[in-house]
Amino acid sequence: MSNQKKGMFVTPDGQNVVFTFILVTSLFLLWGFCNGMIDVMDKHFQDELGLTKAQSAWVQFAHYLGYFLMSIPAGWLATKLGYKGGIITGLVIVAAGGFWFIPATSINDMVRTGQVSANMAFVAFLFGVCLIATGLTFLETIANPYTTVLGDPQYAATRINLAQSTNGIGWIFGPIVGSMYFYSKNAQGQSTGSATLYIPYAGIAVAVLILAVIFYFANIPDIKAEDDYHLDDTTPGVSKSIWSHPHFVMAVAAQFVYVAAQAGIFSFFINYLTADVPPIPASWDTGMKDLSANAGFLSDWLSGWFHTTKDGVLAISDKGAANMASLGFMLFLAGRFSGAGLLKKFSAHKILCYYAVANVVATLVVFLKLGWVSVACVFLSFFFMSIMFPTIFALGIFGLGARAKKASSYIVMAIMGGAVLPKAMGAIADHYDMSRGFAVPMVCFALVAVYGYMWPKLAGADSLASVRPTAGH
Protein backbone atom coordinates (compact mmCIF):
# COMPACT_ATOMS: atom_id res chain seq x y z
CA MET A 1 0.00 0.00 0.00
CA SER A 2 2.91 2.33 0.70
CA ASN A 3 3.78 2.36 -3.03
CA GLN A 4 0.30 3.46 -4.03
CA LYS A 5 -0.10 6.96 -5.37
CA LYS A 6 -1.78 9.26 -2.86
CA GLY A 7 -3.71 12.44 -3.49
CA MET A 8 -6.82 14.47 -2.79
CA PHE A 9 -8.87 12.40 -5.26
CA VAL A 10 -6.86 9.18 -5.42
CA THR A 11 -8.21 6.36 -3.24
CA PRO A 12 -5.89 4.09 -1.22
CA ASP A 13 -6.23 1.39 -3.92
CA GLY A 14 -5.03 3.82 -6.60
CA GLN A 15 -8.33 4.84 -8.27
CA ASN A 16 -8.58 8.40 -9.61
CA VAL A 17 -12.11 9.49 -8.72
CA VAL A 18 -12.03 13.19 -9.55
CA PHE A 19 -14.93 12.89 -12.05
CA THR A 20 -17.02 11.01 -9.51
CA PHE A 21 -16.30 13.74 -6.97
CA ILE A 22 -17.39 16.47 -9.42
CA LEU A 23 -20.62 14.61 -10.18
CA VAL A 24 -21.41 14.10 -6.51
CA THR A 25 -20.79 17.78 -5.74
CA SER A 26 -23.68 18.63 -8.09
CA LEU A 27 -25.95 17.16 -5.40
CA PHE A 28 -24.62 19.69 -2.90
CA LEU A 29 -25.46 22.47 -5.36
CA LEU A 30 -29.00 21.09 -5.66
CA TRP A 31 -29.86 21.00 -1.97
CA GLY A 32 -28.14 24.35 -1.39
CA PHE A 33 -30.46 25.89 -3.98
CA CYS A 34 -33.52 24.25 -2.42
CA ASN A 35 -32.53 25.35 1.08
CA GLY A 36 -31.83 28.89 -0.14
CA MET A 37 -35.40 29.21 -1.42
CA ILE A 38 -36.82 27.75 1.80
CA ASP A 39 -34.96 30.35 3.85
CA VAL A 40 -36.73 33.29 2.16
CA MET A 41 -40.17 31.67 2.15
CA ASP A 42 -41.20 32.44 5.76
CA LYS A 43 -41.84 36.13 5.21
CA HIS A 44 -43.94 35.32 2.12
CA PHE A 45 -46.37 33.28 4.20
CA GLN A 46 -46.36 35.87 7.01
CA ASP A 47 -47.56 38.48 4.50
CA GLU A 48 -49.87 36.31 2.37
CA LEU A 49 -51.54 34.30 5.18
CA GLY A 50 -51.14 36.65 8.14
CA LEU A 51 -48.90 34.31 10.15
CA THR A 52 -46.73 35.24 13.13
CA LYS A 53 -42.99 34.56 13.04
CA ALA A 54 -43.43 31.49 15.22
CA GLN A 55 -46.23 30.18 12.96
CA SER A 56 -44.23 30.75 9.77
CA ALA A 57 -41.46 28.61 11.29
CA TRP A 58 -43.66 25.63 10.40
CA VAL A 59 -41.94 25.91 7.00
CA GLN A 60 -38.63 24.98 8.63
CA PHE A 61 -40.40 22.36 10.76
CA ALA A 62 -41.84 20.65 7.66
CA HIS A 63 -38.49 20.87 5.88
CA TYR A 64 -36.46 19.33 8.68
CA LEU A 65 -39.21 16.86 9.59
CA GLY A 66 -38.54 15.22 6.23
CA TYR A 67 -34.92 14.76 7.26
CA PHE A 68 -35.89 13.36 10.65
CA LEU A 69 -38.40 10.85 9.30
CA MET A 70 -36.25 9.53 6.46
CA SER A 71 -32.68 9.67 7.78
CA ILE A 72 -32.73 6.14 9.24
CA PRO A 73 -34.56 4.56 6.25
CA ALA A 74 -32.18 6.43 3.94
CA GLY A 75 -29.16 5.06 5.78
CA TRP A 76 -30.60 1.53 5.61
CA LEU A 77 -31.37 1.81 1.89
CA ALA A 78 -27.95 3.31 1.22
CA THR A 79 -26.43 0.16 2.72
CA LYS A 80 -28.72 -2.08 0.63
CA LEU A 81 -28.65 -0.14 -2.65
CA GLY A 82 -25.14 1.28 -2.53
CA TYR A 83 -24.21 4.86 -3.20
CA LYS A 84 -25.62 4.98 -6.76
CA GLY A 85 -29.00 3.41 -5.94
CA GLY A 86 -29.50 5.67 -2.92
CA ILE A 87 -28.66 8.80 -4.89
CA ILE A 88 -31.07 7.97 -7.72
CA THR A 89 -33.85 7.21 -5.22
CA GLY A 90 -33.32 10.59 -3.56
CA LEU A 91 -33.41 12.45 -6.88
CA VAL A 92 -36.69 10.83 -7.92
CA ILE A 93 -38.32 11.81 -4.61
CA VAL A 94 -37.10 15.41 -4.97
CA ALA A 95 -38.65 15.51 -8.44
CA ALA A 96 -41.99 14.29 -7.04
CA GLY A 97 -41.87 17.04 -4.40
CA GLY A 98 -41.09 19.69 -6.99
CA PHE A 99 -44.01 18.69 -9.19
CA TRP A 100 -46.34 18.68 -6.15
CA PHE A 101 -46.08 22.48 -5.98
CA ILE A 102 -48.20 22.70 -9.15
CA PRO A 103 -51.39 21.29 -7.52
CA ALA A 104 -50.46 23.06 -4.26
CA THR A 105 -50.62 26.38 -6.14
CA SER A 106 -54.05 25.45 -7.50
CA ILE A 107 -55.23 24.74 -3.94
CA ASN A 108 -53.90 28.14 -2.89
CA ASP A 109 -55.90 29.81 -5.68
CA MET A 110 -59.07 28.36 -4.12
CA VAL A 111 -58.47 30.47 -1.00
CA ARG A 112 -59.55 33.61 -2.87
CA THR A 113 -62.84 32.01 -3.89
CA GLY A 114 -63.49 30.65 -0.41
CA GLN A 115 -63.39 27.01 -1.53
CA VAL A 116 -60.61 26.14 0.93
CA SER A 117 -59.14 27.82 4.00
CA ALA A 118 -55.76 29.55 4.12
CA ASN A 119 -54.59 26.90 6.58
CA MET A 120 -55.34 24.14 4.07
CA ALA A 121 -53.32 25.96 1.40
CA PHE A 122 -50.44 26.41 3.83
CA VAL A 123 -50.50 22.69 4.68
CA ALA A 124 -50.44 21.83 0.95
CA PHE A 125 -47.25 23.83 0.51
CA LEU A 126 -45.77 22.33 3.68
CA PHE A 127 -46.35 18.84 2.29
CA GLY A 128 -44.32 19.73 -0.81
CA VAL A 129 -41.55 21.17 1.36
CA CYS A 130 -41.48 17.97 3.46
CA LEU A 131 -41.49 15.69 0.39
CA ILE A 132 -38.52 17.49 -1.18
CA ALA A 133 -36.68 17.29 2.13
CA THR A 134 -37.34 13.54 2.19
CA GLY A 135 -35.49 13.19 -1.11
CA LEU A 136 -32.71 15.49 0.01
CA THR A 137 -32.27 13.25 3.07
CA PHE A 138 -31.19 10.40 0.80
CA LEU A 139 -28.72 12.67 -0.99
CA GLU A 140 -27.20 14.12 2.18
CA THR A 141 -27.04 10.78 3.98
CA ILE A 142 -25.08 9.34 1.07
CA ALA A 143 -23.14 12.23 -0.47
CA ASN A 144 -21.62 13.63 2.74
CA PRO A 145 -19.84 10.44 3.84
CA TYR A 146 -19.10 9.49 0.22
CA THR A 147 -16.96 12.59 -0.30
CA THR A 148 -14.82 11.58 2.69
CA VAL A 149 -13.75 8.30 1.01
CA LEU A 150 -13.10 9.72 -2.48
CA GLY A 151 -9.35 10.02 -1.95
CA ASP A 152 -6.64 10.04 0.70
CA PRO A 153 -8.23 9.82 4.20
CA GLN A 154 -6.16 12.73 5.54
CA TYR A 155 -8.02 15.09 3.16
CA ALA A 156 -11.49 13.90 4.21
CA ALA A 157 -12.49 17.20 5.88
CA THR A 158 -11.04 19.19 2.98
CA ARG A 159 -13.02 17.23 0.38
CA ILE A 160 -16.33 17.49 2.22
CA ASN A 161 -15.81 21.24 2.64
CA LEU A 162 -14.96 21.65 -1.05
CA ALA A 163 -18.11 19.74 -1.98
CA GLN A 164 -20.12 21.81 0.48
CA SER A 165 -18.75 24.92 -1.23
CA THR A 166 -20.96 24.18 -4.22
CA ASN A 167 -23.76 23.93 -1.68
CA GLY A 168 -22.90 27.55 -0.88
CA ILE A 169 -23.24 28.50 -4.55
CA GLY A 170 -26.73 27.02 -4.59
CA TRP A 171 -27.56 28.97 -1.44
CA ILE A 172 -26.55 32.22 -3.18
CA PHE A 173 -28.91 31.74 -6.11
CA GLY A 174 -31.78 30.20 -4.10
CA PRO A 175 -32.76 33.51 -2.42
CA ILE A 176 -32.42 35.41 -5.73
CA VAL A 177 -34.84 33.04 -7.47
CA GLY A 178 -37.05 33.04 -4.39
CA SER A 179 -37.25 36.84 -4.37
CA MET A 180 -38.26 36.82 -8.05
CA TYR A 181 -41.16 34.39 -7.60
CA PHE A 182 -42.20 34.69 -3.92
CA TYR A 183 -42.22 38.50 -3.79
CA SER A 184 -43.18 39.36 -7.39
CA LYS A 185 -45.71 42.12 -8.09
CA ASN A 186 -47.82 43.08 -11.08
CA ALA A 187 -48.05 46.49 -12.75
CA GLN A 188 -50.57 47.62 -10.11
CA GLY A 189 -48.17 46.78 -7.30
CA GLN A 190 -50.18 43.76 -6.15
CA SER A 191 -48.38 40.63 -4.97
CA THR A 192 -48.35 37.73 -7.43
CA GLY A 193 -46.07 35.50 -5.35
CA SER A 194 -48.72 32.92 -4.50
CA ALA A 195 -49.46 32.35 -8.19
CA THR A 196 -45.81 31.98 -9.28
CA LEU A 197 -44.31 30.14 -6.31
CA TYR A 198 -44.54 26.77 -8.09
CA ILE A 199 -42.39 27.78 -11.10
CA PRO A 200 -38.90 27.31 -9.59
CA TYR A 201 -39.95 24.03 -7.98
CA ALA A 202 -41.26 22.62 -11.25
CA GLY A 203 -37.93 23.61 -12.81
CA ILE A 204 -36.06 21.76 -10.06
CA ALA A 205 -38.16 18.65 -10.70
CA VAL A 206 -37.18 18.57 -14.38
CA ALA A 207 -33.50 19.20 -13.61
CA VAL A 208 -33.19 16.42 -11.04
CA LEU A 209 -34.81 13.86 -13.33
CA ILE A 210 -32.13 14.66 -15.90
CA LEU A 211 -29.48 14.34 -13.18
CA ALA A 212 -30.91 10.95 -12.14
CA VAL A 213 -30.41 9.66 -15.70
CA ILE A 214 -26.79 10.88 -15.67
CA PHE A 215 -26.11 9.07 -12.38
CA TYR A 216 -27.71 5.90 -13.73
CA PHE A 217 -25.14 5.67 -16.53
CA ALA A 218 -22.16 7.04 -14.54
CA ASN A 219 -19.49 5.00 -12.75
CA ILE A 220 -20.11 5.43 -9.01
CA PRO A 221 -17.74 3.03 -7.17
CA ASP A 222 -18.90 1.75 -3.78
CA ILE A 223 -15.78 2.59 -1.77
CA LYS A 224 -15.47 1.40 1.82
CA ALA A 225 -14.35 3.82 4.53
CA GLU A 226 -11.32 3.14 6.75
CA ASP A 227 -12.17 0.99 9.79
CA ASP A 228 -9.85 2.66 12.32
CA TYR A 229 -11.79 1.37 15.32
CA HIS A 230 -12.03 -2.22 13.97
CA LEU A 231 -15.82 -2.24 14.03
CA ASP A 232 -15.86 -4.68 11.13
CA ASP A 233 -13.60 -7.37 12.58
CA THR A 234 -14.39 -10.15 15.02
CA THR A 235 -11.84 -9.31 17.70
CA PRO A 236 -13.22 -10.34 21.14
CA GLY A 237 -13.98 -7.38 23.40
CA VAL A 238 -14.18 -4.85 20.57
CA SER A 239 -17.49 -2.98 20.60
CA LYS A 240 -19.39 -3.09 17.33
CA SER A 241 -21.79 -0.28 18.22
CA ILE A 242 -21.24 3.20 16.82
CA TRP A 243 -22.87 4.53 19.99
CA SER A 244 -19.91 3.36 22.05
CA HIS A 245 -17.77 6.06 20.41
CA PRO A 246 -18.27 9.45 22.10
CA HIS A 247 -16.88 11.46 19.19
CA PHE A 248 -19.83 10.18 17.11
CA VAL A 249 -22.45 10.58 19.84
CA MET A 250 -21.42 14.16 20.52
CA ALA A 251 -21.31 14.89 16.77
CA VAL A 252 -25.02 14.07 16.63
CA ALA A 253 -25.67 16.55 19.45
CA ALA A 254 -23.37 19.19 17.92
CA GLN A 255 -25.06 18.85 14.53
CA PHE A 256 -28.49 19.23 16.17
CA VAL A 257 -27.62 22.57 17.77
CA TYR A 258 -25.61 23.81 14.79
CA VAL A 259 -28.44 23.25 12.29
CA ALA A 260 -30.82 24.84 14.80
CA ALA A 261 -28.66 27.98 14.83
CA GLN A 262 -28.24 27.98 11.05
CA ALA A 263 -31.94 27.48 10.34
CA GLY A 264 -32.91 30.22 12.79
CA ILE A 265 -30.54 32.81 11.34
CA PHE A 266 -31.33 31.94 7.73
CA SER A 267 -35.12 31.79 8.12
CA PHE A 268 -35.43 35.04 10.11
CA PHE A 269 -32.82 36.97 8.12
CA ILE A 270 -35.52 38.87 6.20
CA ASN A 271 -37.40 39.67 9.40
CA TYR A 272 -34.23 41.08 10.94
CA LEU A 273 -33.32 43.26 7.95
CA THR A 274 -36.86 44.60 7.53
CA ALA A 275 -37.47 45.38 11.22
CA ASP A 276 -34.27 45.78 13.28
CA VAL A 277 -31.97 47.66 10.91
CA PRO A 278 -31.40 51.41 11.47
CA PRO A 279 -33.17 53.81 9.03
CA ILE A 280 -31.80 53.64 5.49
CA PRO A 281 -30.09 56.82 4.16
CA ALA A 282 -32.05 58.41 1.31
CA SER A 283 -28.90 58.33 -0.84
CA TRP A 284 -29.05 54.51 -0.86
CA ASP A 285 -32.53 54.53 -2.37
CA THR A 286 -31.56 57.16 -4.94
CA GLY A 287 -28.45 55.22 -5.90
CA MET A 288 -30.38 51.97 -6.27
CA LYS A 289 -33.01 53.64 -8.47
CA ASP A 290 -30.30 55.13 -10.69
CA LEU A 291 -28.59 51.75 -10.93
CA SER A 292 -31.88 50.05 -11.77
CA ALA A 293 -32.68 52.58 -14.49
CA ASN A 294 -29.41 51.77 -16.26
CA ALA A 295 -29.26 48.04 -15.61
CA GLY A 296 -31.18 46.84 -18.67
CA PHE A 297 -32.57 43.34 -18.16
CA LEU A 298 -31.52 43.47 -14.48
CA SER A 299 -33.73 46.48 -13.76
CA ASP A 300 -36.65 44.37 -12.46
CA TRP A 301 -34.35 42.55 -10.07
CA LEU A 302 -32.74 45.75 -8.75
CA SER A 303 -35.95 47.73 -8.33
CA GLY A 304 -37.93 47.79 -5.11
CA TRP A 305 -35.15 46.98 -2.63
CA PHE A 306 -36.27 49.82 -0.31
CA HIS A 307 -39.65 51.21 0.70
CA THR A 308 -41.09 53.88 2.97
CA THR A 309 -42.84 52.59 6.09
CA LYS A 310 -46.10 53.91 7.55
CA ASP A 311 -43.97 56.06 9.86
CA GLY A 312 -42.27 57.71 6.88
CA VAL A 313 -38.95 55.91 7.48
CA LEU A 314 -36.98 54.45 4.58
CA ALA A 315 -36.42 50.73 5.19
CA ILE A 316 -35.38 47.54 3.42
CA SER A 317 -38.26 45.79 1.63
CA ASP A 318 -38.97 42.06 1.72
CA LYS A 319 -37.63 41.73 -1.81
CA GLY A 320 -34.51 43.70 -0.95
CA ALA A 321 -33.85 41.58 2.13
CA ALA A 322 -34.35 38.36 0.15
CA ASN A 323 -31.75 39.53 -2.35
CA MET A 324 -29.38 40.65 0.40
CA ALA A 325 -29.53 37.11 1.74
CA SER A 326 -27.49 36.22 -1.33
CA LEU A 327 -24.74 38.52 -0.05
CA GLY A 328 -24.76 36.56 3.19
CA PHE A 329 -24.49 33.31 1.25
CA MET A 330 -21.58 34.74 -0.75
CA LEU A 331 -19.78 35.17 2.56
CA PHE A 332 -20.90 31.64 3.44
CA LEU A 333 -19.33 30.40 0.19
CA ALA A 334 -16.14 32.40 0.82
CA GLY A 335 -15.94 30.78 4.24
CA ARG A 336 -16.28 27.33 2.68
CA PHE A 337 -13.47 27.87 0.17
CA SER A 338 -11.10 29.55 2.62
CA GLY A 339 -12.02 27.01 5.28
CA ALA A 340 -11.17 24.13 2.95
CA GLY A 341 -7.71 25.67 2.58
CA LEU A 342 -7.26 26.07 6.32
CA LEU A 343 -8.35 22.49 6.93
CA LYS A 344 -5.45 21.27 4.78
CA LYS A 345 -3.01 22.93 7.19
CA PHE A 346 -4.71 22.87 10.60
CA SER A 347 -6.67 20.31 12.61
CA ALA A 348 -10.37 20.25 11.75
CA HIS A 349 -11.53 20.27 15.39
CA LYS A 350 -9.49 23.42 16.12
CA ILE A 351 -10.92 25.33 13.14
CA LEU A 352 -14.42 24.25 14.18
CA CYS A 353 -13.86 25.54 17.72
CA TYR A 354 -12.41 28.89 16.60
CA TYR A 355 -15.22 29.53 14.11
CA ALA A 356 -17.89 28.62 16.66
CA VAL A 357 -16.40 31.03 19.22
CA ALA A 358 -16.36 33.76 16.56
CA ASN A 359 -20.08 33.20 16.00
CA VAL A 360 -20.82 33.34 19.72
CA VAL A 361 -19.31 36.83 19.68
CA ALA A 362 -21.15 37.81 16.46
CA THR A 363 -24.58 36.74 17.72
CA LEU A 364 -23.93 38.44 21.08
CA VAL A 365 -23.31 41.72 19.25
CA VAL A 366 -26.58 41.25 17.32
CA PHE A 367 -28.39 40.57 20.61
CA LEU A 368 -26.99 43.82 22.10
CA LYS A 369 -28.51 45.89 19.21
CA LEU A 370 -25.47 48.00 18.35
CA GLY A 371 -26.84 49.49 15.13
CA TRP A 372 -24.93 48.88 11.92
CA VAL A 373 -22.24 46.95 13.82
CA SER A 374 -24.90 44.37 14.69
CA VAL A 375 -26.07 44.28 11.06
CA ALA A 376 -22.50 43.57 9.97
CA CYS A 377 -22.27 40.76 12.53
CA VAL A 378 -25.36 39.07 11.08
CA PHE A 379 -23.51 38.85 7.77
CA LEU A 380 -20.29 37.75 9.50
CA SER A 381 -22.20 34.90 11.12
CA PHE A 382 -22.75 33.46 7.63
CA PHE A 383 -18.97 33.35 7.07
CA PHE A 384 -18.20 31.59 10.35
CA MET A 385 -21.06 29.09 9.97
CA SER A 386 -19.66 27.95 6.64
CA ILE A 387 -17.41 25.06 7.68
CA MET A 388 -19.44 23.80 10.63
CA PHE A 389 -21.85 21.27 9.10
CA PRO A 390 -19.33 19.38 6.94
CA THR A 391 -16.61 19.53 9.59
CA ILE A 392 -18.88 18.16 12.33
CA PHE A 393 -19.91 15.47 9.84
CA ALA A 394 -16.32 14.45 9.06
CA LEU A 395 -15.33 14.48 12.74
CA GLY A 396 -18.39 12.42 13.68
CA ILE A 397 -17.94 9.56 11.18
CA PHE A 398 -14.16 9.44 11.59
CA GLY A 399 -12.84 5.90 11.76
CA LEU A 400 -16.20 4.10 11.68
CA GLY A 401 -15.53 1.99 8.58
CA ALA A 402 -18.52 0.45 6.82
CA ARG A 403 -20.73 1.74 9.61
CA ALA A 404 -20.10 5.29 8.42
CA LYS A 405 -23.29 5.05 6.31
CA LYS A 406 -25.34 4.15 9.37
CA ALA A 407 -23.62 6.83 11.45
CA SER A 408 -24.30 9.30 8.65
CA SER A 409 -28.04 8.65 8.88
CA TYR A 410 -28.06 9.61 12.57
CA ILE A 411 -26.04 12.77 11.96
CA VAL A 412 -28.49 13.70 9.20
CA MET A 413 -31.36 12.96 11.61
CA ALA A 414 -29.82 15.56 13.91
CA ILE A 415 -30.81 18.14 11.30
CA MET A 416 -34.16 18.02 13.13
CA GLY A 417 -32.68 20.78 15.28
CA GLY A 418 -33.60 23.09 12.43
CA ALA A 419 -37.27 22.22 12.96
CA VAL A 420 -37.40 22.69 16.72
CA LEU A 421 -35.34 25.63 17.92
CA PRO A 422 -36.23 28.22 15.23
CA LYS A 423 -39.76 28.16 16.66
CA ALA A 424 -38.25 29.21 20.00
CA MET A 425 -36.29 31.93 18.23
CA GLY A 426 -39.50 33.12 16.53
CA ALA A 427 -41.42 33.09 19.81
CA ILE A 428 -38.76 35.26 21.47
CA ALA A 429 -38.87 37.62 18.48
CA ASP A 430 -42.67 37.84 18.66
CA HIS A 431 -42.48 38.69 22.37
CA TYR A 432 -39.47 41.04 22.29
CA ASP A 433 -37.82 41.71 18.92
CA MET A 434 -35.77 39.88 16.30
CA SER A 435 -32.42 40.94 17.78
CA ARG A 436 -33.24 39.30 21.11
CA GLY A 437 -34.08 36.09 19.25
CA PHE A 438 -30.38 35.73 18.42
CA ALA A 439 -29.83 34.50 21.99
CA VAL A 440 -30.90 31.05 20.73
CA PRO A 441 -28.15 30.60 18.09
CA MET A 442 -25.62 32.17 20.49
CA VAL A 443 -26.12 29.30 22.94
CA CYS A 444 -26.03 26.76 20.09
CA PHE A 445 -22.68 28.01 18.79
CA ALA A 446 -21.21 27.84 22.29
CA LEU A 447 -22.08 24.12 22.43
CA VAL A 448 -20.49 23.53 19.01
CA ALA A 449 -17.31 25.21 20.27
CA VAL A 450 -17.22 22.79 23.21
CA TYR A 451 -17.46 19.82 20.82
CA GLY A 452 -14.56 21.10 18.72
CA TYR A 453 -12.45 21.66 21.82
CA MET A 454 -13.24 18.23 23.29
CA TRP A 455 -12.98 16.17 20.07
CA PRO A 456 -9.39 14.83 20.50
CA LYS A 457 -10.30 13.41 23.90
CA LEU A 458 -13.63 12.05 22.63
CA ALA A 459 -12.10 10.39 19.54
CA GLY A 460 -8.77 9.31 20.97
CA ALA A 461 -7.10 11.00 18.02
CA ASP A 462 -4.87 14.00 17.48
CA SER A 463 -6.56 14.85 14.17
CA LEU A 464 -8.64 13.30 11.39
CA ALA A 465 -5.48 11.71 9.98
CA SER A 466 -4.15 9.99 13.09
CA VAL A 467 -5.54 7.67 15.75
CA ARG A 468 -3.53 7.20 18.95
CA PRO A 469 -3.11 3.42 19.28
CA THR A 470 -3.29 3.55 23.08
CA ALA A 471 -6.51 5.54 23.16
CA GLY A 472 -9.63 3.70 24.27
CA HIS A 473 -13.38 4.24 23.95
Image (cartoon, rainbow, N blue to C red):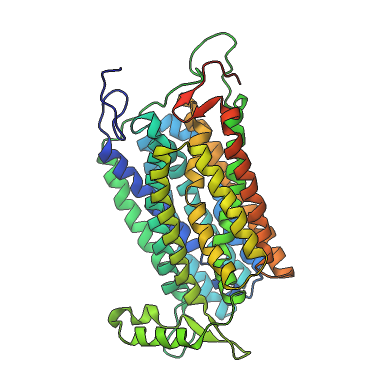
Report which quarter residue 117 is drawn in.
bottom right
Q: Position of residue 223 (x, y in %)?
A: 36, 28
The residue shown at (38%, 57%) is: 169
The residue shown at (43%, 30%) is: 80
Residue 156 shown left or right of residue 408 in the figure: left
Camera-side residue: 323 or 234? 323
How many numbered discs sit on the rendered protein?
0
The residue shown at (64%, 48%) is: 446
Q: Position of residue 415 (x, y in %)?
A: 56, 47
Camera-side residue: 140 or 328? 328
Q: Determine the residue located farthest toward the right in the rendered image.
A: 431
Residue 118 shown left or right of residue 188 in the figure: right
Residue 120 shown left or right of residue 304 in the figure: right
Report which quarter residue 18 is drawn in.
top left
Q: Is residue 104 above or below residue 209?
A: below
Q: Is residue 248 above or below residue 239?
A: below
Answer whether residue 53 is visible to the viewer in this image: yes
Q: Is residue 315 above or below residue 74?
A: below
Q: Position of residue 467 (x, y in %)?
A: 49, 22
Q: Quadrant of the C terminus?
A: top right
Q: Position of residue 311 (x, y in %)?
A: 63, 89
Report which quarter residue 279 is drawn in.
bottom right
Q: Quadrant of the N terminus?
A: top left
Answer whether residue 124 is visible to the viewer in this image: no
Q: Determine the residue located farthest toward the top in the rendered image.
A: 236
Q: Is residue 238 above or below residue 184?
A: above
The residue shown at (41%, 89%) is: 187
Camera-side residue: 69 or 401? 401
